[in-house]
Structures are given as structure tokens and as C-alpha cells.
Amino acid sequence: MRYKRQREIVNQELLTNAHVMVIGAGGLGSAALYYLTAAGVGKITIVDSDNVEESNLNRQVLHFTDDIGRPKVLSALRKLSALNPEIQIEVKYMRITPTTIALLPEADLIIDCLDNMDTRFILNRFCIEKGIPMVHAAVEAFEGRLTVIIPGKTPCLACIYAGVPPKKGEFPIIGATAGFFGTAEAMEAIKFLSKKGKVLAGKMLIVDLLSWEHSIYSTTFNLNCPVCGGKRW
Ligand SMILES: [Zn+2]
């Protein structure tokens, strides 16, 4: 009964048999995790190293006021298990470094819900080396971007952001921006896993939520990419 309203439009068996790993249980992760859990993705691994802080609560809607000080992965586990006890949820309370990333399992799909480029590049290398597709989103203020990276088929994150200096430190963000793009990440994951529609593979969607101005452009291989080699396999 749980999936009655979606069975006609998605292949539930494909979702039930899938393993998705969500990196980051913050603003993007809160929305992505809610919808992946509700949709019945059979196994979800959540990776995060932070504890809930009061200043997270304007956007990280998986976490409540009484979670302050608690690891985000445990706060997320509690809510998501209550939402859907039929799926398997595994948590990894760990910081991703070039060394620790080897401890992560190999999933069918990875969702990048991170908030910094340094960790994203470590994750990108892992995905390319293991051949795991990745949904990438990034948000700031009222803007965000979304793409899907398929190793061997599309440019990787290092291709896309070649020469772009990574921003450091805190940036302003309103919760609905993170929610909008986290939901869009879940949508791409559901489409990809259930083989419905067209995901943004090799395409980048950019939306300014203040004006609804948006564009989709094709991402390009960097021929000198140190991660993917800048070419199709
Ligand atoms: Zn590349």
C-alpha cells in the first residue's frame, strides 16, 4: 500500500533493489533523503561527520531543535527509520578525506549533498575510479545547479570546475533553495534508478530562484582532466 500511488509510474522493484549513498546530511541531504526514503529506495547509506548546530535549522529540515549536538547521521536515521521502516539505512559518521573515502561501500548511485568543493573533488575521484554515477548539486543564497555524472560517458566534476577557484567559508543560504535542489537530486536518482525519463547527464541546469531565470548547458570534457582523462571510455 505504501507505494500504491507511484507503482503505475515507476518500477518499484528497481527502487527496492537499489543502493544509494547520500554524502552529506545537511540542507541538500535533508530533502534528498526524505524523498528517497519515502520512495522506498531499498538501501540508503548516509555519510556525514558533523553534529547538528542551531544555525543548521533554517535549512536542514531533517534535524530538529532537540537534535542540537547530536551527530547528523543519527538524527537523520531516527527520522527516516520512522518515515519508512521497510528500507535498510546504514550510517557512516566519518569525515571524507583522500584516505577515509576508501572505507565507503560501492553503491549503485551517489548523491553529492556536500557544501564544499574540496570534499566534492575527493568524492568525484572515488566515483570515477569505481565507475559509480553521481548526482551533483550545489546551492548558494537563491541559486543552485544540478548535473548527473556518468563515469566514462560524461565530463566529471573536475572537468566541469576546471580553473574555477573554490569558494571558502560560510555562504548565505535560505532553506527552500537547498530543499528545491535536494528534491531535484532525489528526482534525478529516482529517474536514473527506475530508468524513467532523461537525467541531466552531461548537462548542467542552473536556476535563479529569485527570477526563475534558468538555463541548461552541455558540460564539456577537459582534455587535461587529471581525474577522468577528459575522454569517454
Ligand atoms: Zn574529468
Image (cartoon, rainbow, N blue to C red):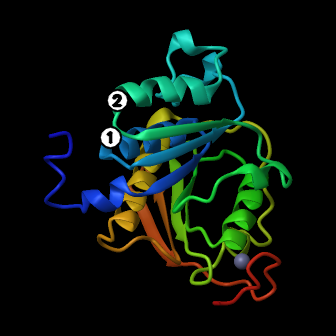
Residue 154 drawn above or below residue 9: below
Q: Label 2 crowding class (10 Å Cα cut-off): few <14, some 14-19, many 20+?
A: few
Q: Give the residue at x 64% y 54%.
A: 105
Q: Is residue 11 left or right of residue 191?
A: left
The part of the image, by quadrant, that contains residue 219 is bottom right
Instruction: Indicate the position of residue 151 as horizontal and vertical percent values.
Output: 61, 77
Kind of residue at badge 1: Ala
Question: At which x and y percent is residue 204?
Answer: 52, 70
Report the front residue among 143 and 7.
Answer: 7
Residue in view at x 13 percent, y 59 percent: 8
Residue placed at 42% from the left, 59% from the top? Answer: 189
Q: Position of residue 143 (x, y in %)?
A: 52, 50
- Quadrant the N terminus occupies: top left
Q: Which residue is mark 2?
A: 83
Do residues under tags 2 and 1 come within 8 Å of each other at their CB atoms? yes
SS of the residue at dot 1? helix
Furthest residue to the right? 99
Q: Quadrant of the C terminus?
A: bottom right
Q: Is residue 14 visible?
A: yes
- The image's mark for residue 106 is none
- Identify whether 181 is placed above or below 221: above
Q: CA distance from mark 2 to mark 1?
A: 7 Å
- Which of the four quarters of the rendered structure image does ligand 1 lie in? bottom right
Point out the tag, 2 or 1, that comes first from the N-terminus.
Answer: 1
Task: Check disc 1 and report the residue beneath it.
Answer: 38
Where on the picture, by quarter, is residue 55? top right
